[in-house]
Image (cartoon, rainbow, N blue to C red):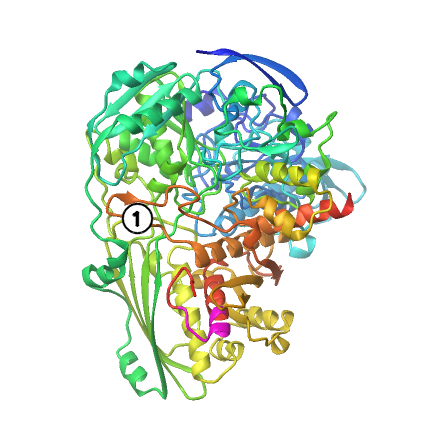
């Protein structure tokens, strides 16, 4: 029941034999050691598993890997280019926007997906976009702040 | 990582009392200050902890110029790694980039119990500071001999000791790779705060750099070549008995290595993680359970607490209390309620375990590696020396969540399936249903005050289940130990004192009674951030606000005139000034409320102002802003302190406005984020935190300071705009 799957992850073509029903998250984490996306709920409720799929924020904890064939998948690890971290990652570090950090992947992906469509979002739009992601430490104010700073200076 | 085969004495003999030296050993739970350091330096040789009184139990120097800090406390997202490195680097007078830290590993660090009660900086920080001072003191004496100049003439810069004539020798040259066994004497001088280079500065947390790049950081991210994946099928409700599970239907699924059934403990092991998940889903459907009903329904919970609590425990009593209340010019009585709350960690609990002939290794997100080891030792009747618990960061826990349970379950599976590394991760509903909650509580308060607003007497009656069932050596405290065929029953062994944490007012009350009514509730409970302090401060500070109204006094004035502690008064005055209290917006739809406490009456002081706004139809409210002022004594890292406090404020706002565990006779209904909603970015208030830094005073625990006061401040603000006092959480209008 395994079949050949072809995925485009962080600019590389990846071929693998897998159960086409297997959600992408397990493949990213276990086959390609991309540990950035996290399992949080397995229910599309918390956003910790999100990646960019053709630039859109996409859950990966339930959606079968085969669904991602032909799409450009970018994980948080793929944001760094030529050894340089993405400016939004730098911005998150500068603002020290994390406590336990489990939700940081989802927050960064949600922010990038928002900025792609709305380069200069309002505070309300930022808050709406980040509300896809569950944070239990209460770091939300810093996440909103960093996206606000990032979009007003770039 | 291999278990240490030898006993401690042999190990030391063979390794020639090593401590200082340079060998490449992989260290799992160690962060370095810089990536480059990480690349070239994989850590000091592992060595068991040999006692708190030895310098090198806390601080180790190698011959290459690296400093290793060791702590038994865990990084839980509170920034403890960075704060402890700051303390060590300052006291040792070395560049912070030389330092890295190892947290919580029974193979290496001191036994510092649980990382709890906001006491890591107070406890571990103090020990590390003293050890660093002692190490430096010893090295300076060596340098004095080597350079043949008096001690007093020496100066230190980044680990190099200079004589007045500029001759110098570094710590590493002095040590020359030798081991010096030195005890902490208490005689080494501690630096004055003015000499600190790092303490008091917002040094960024380097682990956040790893996090924003998505690098492996959590126990969830560990991977070993021999790793297999497990899931546990928990019973559908407390006390359910497994009647039937057709194992062959599961073993027939692809990739399934084994299905383990031991009494009511059911686990599946698979080659691939998704195969384990699929099997878990199928088992959930085909397993047949006999389920006992939960008897006390939410609608009867609070009346049942009053009816079926134990005979009250007398915590404080004064024969004049009742008469003083009766004789007071103004009197007030009020009753408050708080539901069950959950930790609700964003990531489900996860642990890895491996069982070999040599013993058991567990990689765990626990808050206490040594207590976990003791409890695993009890569970398996295995010598604790044969168990190693390595602390690895988990998703934020905020107390006793599923971290210990998942570790024990991974170990149970590993025992039945030895010689492979078992990775067990809970599903979302496991976390929501099986974690121990913060207990529901009732708080009856009664007081008498003078006409000019001075407290005369007060009585508190509290009803609560226990706030600590941490598995501190007793296997029955692991939830799955109860599910095994040879069931190890849970024995609560009394109720914890956490229930009345912060019930006793810091205000001057001449006559005071406190009675605790311990209650065996329907749901599993344990330590949730702040324990009883959250509900006690909610009640007390709502009550104090009401007393202020009764006396016709401004809530700041009433609080300040009933306080004696100048630091308590200072946070309130700072808050009043900072927020321009006197000229606050008096629009009808706006509400303002304040609250104050000193956490545990011994840790950080915190005062907060909440601003709420009523909707135009007056049927709902929004929390607009929280402004806090905190005094945590000497502030180690102001940004870390602000981050923790902001987080505590937002988390408490979520508990206070939205949260209650729901259940019915069939079990827990709060199983995911839809059935247990928490605050999200769109509903957060603006948060501001101001620090009153007192570098000359000892640092005070701050991680839980905001929880209680925020609840009361919101309640008082809601009253301010609705005119109705809030008695129940979560606050609905």
Question: Closer to the camera, A106 or B58?
Answer: A106
Q: Where is residue A135 drawn, in percent x and y? A: 52, 45
Tell me if B162 is positioned left or right of B224 in this view.
Answer: right
Q: Where is residue B667 drawn, in percent x and y? A: 27, 44
Residue B719 located within the stretch drawn in magenta: yes
The residue where tag 1 is placed is B663
Q: Quadrant of the C terminus of chain B?
A: bottom left
Q: Where is residue A12 drawn, in percent x and y? A: 66, 17
Q: Where is residue B243 drawn, in percent x and y? A: 18, 29
Tell me if A121 is positioned left or right of B290 in this view.
Answer: right
Q: Residue furthest right?
A: B165
In the image, the segment drawn in magenta is: B718-726
The chain that hosts pointer 1 is B
Quarter of the view holding residue B655: bottom left
Residue B315 located within the stretch drawn in magenta: no
Question: Closer to the camera, B442 or B198?
Answer: B442
Quarter of the view holding residue B245: top left
Tell me if residue B208 can be seen. no
Tell me if B162 is positioned left or right of B92 in this view.
Answer: right
Q: Residue at x 57, y 52 (%)?
A: B682
Q: Residue at x 52, y 47 (%)?
A: A137
Tell me if B106 is positioned left or right of B340 in this view.
Answer: right
Dot 1 falls on a residue whose secondary structure is strand
């Amino acid at each position: 029941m395994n079949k050949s799957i072809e995925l485009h992850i962080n600019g590389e073509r990846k071929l693998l034999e897998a159960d086409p029903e297997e959600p992408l998250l397990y493949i990213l984490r276990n086959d390609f050691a991309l540990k950035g996306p996290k399992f949080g709920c397995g229910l599309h409720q918390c956003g910790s598993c999100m990646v960019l799929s053709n630039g859109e924020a996409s859950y990966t904890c339930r959606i079968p890997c085969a669904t991602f064939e032909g799409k450009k998948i970018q994980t948080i690890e793929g944001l760094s280019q030529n050894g340089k971290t993405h400016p939004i990652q730098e911005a998150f570090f500068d603002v020290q926007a994390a406590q336990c950090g489990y939700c940081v992947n989802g927050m960064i992906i949600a922010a990038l997906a928002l900025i792609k469509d709305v380069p200069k979002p309002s505070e309300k739009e930022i808050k709406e976009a980040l509300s896809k992601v569950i944070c239990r430490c209460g770091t939300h104010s810093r996440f909103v702040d960093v996206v606000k700073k990032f979009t007003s200076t770039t | 990582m291999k278990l240490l085969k030898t006993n401690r004495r042999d190990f030391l003999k063979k390794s020639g009392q090593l401590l200082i030296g340079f060998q490449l050993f992989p260290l799992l739970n160690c962060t370095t200050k810089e990536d480059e350091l990480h690349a070239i330096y994989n850590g000091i040789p592992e060595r068991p902890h040999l006692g708190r009184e030895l310098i090198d139990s806390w601080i180790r120097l190698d011959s290459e110029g690296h400093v290793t800090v060791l702590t038994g406390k865990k990084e839980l997202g509170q920034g403890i790694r960075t704060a402890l490195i700051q303390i060590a680097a300052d006291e040792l007078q070395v560049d912070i980039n030389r330092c890295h830290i190892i947290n919580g590993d029974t193979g290496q660090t001191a036994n510092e119990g649980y990382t709890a009660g906001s006491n890591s900086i107070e406890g571990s920080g103090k020990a590390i500071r003293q050890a660093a001072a002692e190490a430096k003191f010893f090295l300076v004496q060596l340098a004095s001999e080597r350079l043949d100049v008096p001690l007093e003439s020496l100066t230190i810069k980044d680990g190099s000791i200079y004589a007045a004539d500029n001759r110098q020798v570094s710590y590493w040259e002095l040590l020359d790779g030798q081991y010096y066994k030195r005890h902490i004497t208490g005689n080494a001088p501690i630096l004055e705060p003015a000499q600190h280079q790092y303490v008091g500065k917002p040094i960024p947390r380097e682990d956040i750099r790893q996090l924003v790049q998505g690098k492996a950081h959590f126990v969830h991210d560990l991977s070993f070549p021999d790793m297999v994946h497990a899931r546990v099928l928990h019973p559908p409700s407390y006390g359910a008995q497994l009647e039937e599970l057709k194992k062959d239907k599961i073993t027939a699924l692809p990739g399934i290595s084994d299905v383990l059934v031991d009494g009511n403990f059911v686990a599946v092991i698979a080659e691939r993680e998704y195969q384990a998940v699929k099997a878990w889903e199928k088992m959930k459907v085909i397993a047949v359970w006999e389920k006992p009903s939960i008897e006390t329904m939410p609608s009867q919970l609070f009346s049942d607490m009053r009816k079926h609590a134990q005979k009250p425990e007398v915590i404080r009593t004064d024969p004049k209390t009742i008469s003083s209340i009766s004789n007071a010019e103004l009197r007030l009585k009020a009753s408050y309620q708080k539901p069950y709350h959950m930790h609700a960690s964003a990531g489900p609990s996860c642990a890895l375990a491996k069982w070999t002939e040599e013993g058991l290794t567990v990689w765990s997100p626990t808050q206490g590696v040594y207590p976990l080891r003791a409890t695993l030792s009890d569970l398996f009747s295995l010598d604790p020396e044969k168990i190693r618990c390595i602390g690895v960061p988990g998703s934020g826990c905020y107390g006793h969540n599923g971290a210990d349970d998942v570790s024990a379950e991974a170990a149970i599976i590993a025992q039945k399936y030895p010689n492979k590394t078992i990775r067990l991760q809970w599903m979302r509903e496991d976390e929501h249903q099986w974690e121990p909650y913060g207990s529901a509580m009732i708080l009856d308060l009664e007081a008498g005050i003078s006409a000019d607003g001075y407290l005369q007497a007060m009585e508190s009656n509290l009803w609560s289940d226990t706030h600590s069932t941490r598995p501190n050596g007793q296997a029955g405290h692991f939830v799955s130990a109860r599910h095994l065929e040879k069931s190890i029953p849970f024995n609560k062994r009394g109720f914890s004192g956490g229930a009345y944490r912060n019930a006793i007012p810091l205000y001057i009350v001449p006559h005071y009674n406190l009675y605790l009514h311990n209650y065996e509730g329907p749901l599993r409970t344990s330590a949730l951030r702040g324990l009883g302090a959250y509900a006690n401060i909610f009640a007390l500070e709502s009550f104090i606000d009401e007393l202020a109204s009764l006396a016709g006094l401004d809530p700041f004035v009433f609080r300040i005139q009933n306080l004696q502690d100048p630091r308590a008064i200072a946070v309130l005055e700072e808050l009043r000034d900072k927020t321009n209290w006197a000229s606050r917006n008096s629009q009808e739809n706006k509400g303002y409320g304040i609250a104050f406490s000193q956490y545990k009456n011994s840790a950080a002081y915190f005062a907060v102002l909440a601003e709420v706004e009523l909707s135009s139809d007056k049927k709902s409210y929004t929390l607009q802003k929280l402004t806090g002022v905190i005094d945590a004594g000497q502030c180690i890292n102001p940004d870390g302190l602000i981050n923790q406090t902001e987080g505590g404020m937002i988390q408490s706002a979520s508990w206070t406005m939205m949260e209650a565990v729901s259940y019915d006779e069939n079990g827990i209904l709060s199983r995911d984020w839809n059935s247990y909603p928490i605050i999200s970015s769109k509903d957060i208030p603006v948060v501001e935190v101001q620090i009153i830094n007192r570098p000359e005073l000892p640092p005070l625990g701050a991680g839980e300071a905001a929880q209680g006061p925020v609840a009361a401040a919101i309640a008082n603000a809601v009253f301010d705009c609705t005119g109705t006092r809030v008695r129940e959480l979560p606050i609905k209008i």
